[in-house]
Amino acid sequence: MYTLIGGANNRTFRVLWMLEELGLPYQRQHAQPHDDLVRGKSPLGKLPVLVVEDVPLTDSVAILTWLADSTGRLTAPAGSLARAQQDGITQQIVDELEGQVWVAARHSFILPKERRVPEIKPTLAWEFARNCDVLARRMQGDFLMGDQMTVPDLLLTHCLNWAAVAKFDVPNEALQAYAARMRGREAYRRAVASEKAMLAGASASA
């Protein structure tokens, strides 16, 4: 039994979705960034945290990678050339897509008001759309790596979800169709239902 610590509407969703895809047993603990519970598990106080045999794992990409490696699923084998290519696409998503959306979020509601530069957001949106086109050209099939879902697919779909919240356009038709397919997966829908239940529970206890 894994324990997933985190809230809704953040990177916790990536790990939640992967647990559902893998069919692994888990329980959830609601927490916000920098809560005492999180600080006790993560030096940076960031979400998510996955507790495995009393060992806390941090950073969503690292957690997804560990889950994939430990189960041998949703990944190419460690040390293979296919894995090196997969990891390259993972880093491309983190650097060139997530980075743009994250900076936009910081300048929208995370940084102190006097430190925000909202004028940067149109440039970030333009760069995001351009980087989407570059990534789409690397798609090798229904999924990023071909006919098998892998870790970068979870990351890309989550980034595309974030982009919708940030009002970033994704004009690339291939990625639009891809996102629709990914959101139609049963495991994705179960993860969304879990998020809604957590939000409802948090609101009721507030």
Image (tube, grey):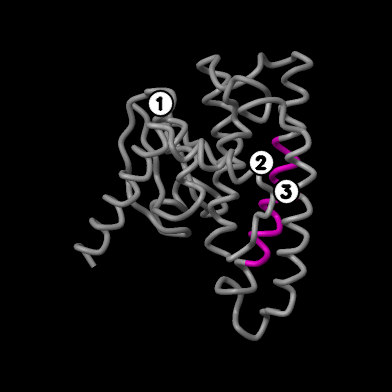
Marks 2 and 3 sit apart, C-alpha to C-alpha, by: 10 Å
Mark nearer the N terminus (2 vs 3):
3
For disc 2, the marked residue is: 174
Viewer-nearest residue: 96 or 65: 96
Camera-near label (2 vs 3) is 2
Q: Secondary structure at mark 3?
A: helix
For disc 1, the marked residue is: 53
- Tell me: residue 167, above or below residue 118: above
Camera-near label (1 vs 2) is 2
Looking at the image, which residue is at 33% across and 31% down? 26
The quarter of the picture where the C terminus appears is bottom left
For disc 3, the marked residue is: 132
Looking at the image, which residue is at 67% across and 22% down? 146
Residue 100 included in the magenta stretch of the image: yes
Residue 43 included in the magenta stretch of the image: no
Q: Quadrant of residue 9?
A: bottom left
Viewer-nearest residue: 45 or 82: 82
Left or right, residue 120 beside residue 55: right
Marks 3 and 1 sit apart, C-alpha to C-alpha, by: 38 Å
Provide residue 11's location: percent of width, then percent of height.
51, 48
Classify mark 1: residues with Cα within 10 Å, few (<14), some (14-19) or many (20+).
few
What range of the chain is rendered magenta?
Answer: 90-104
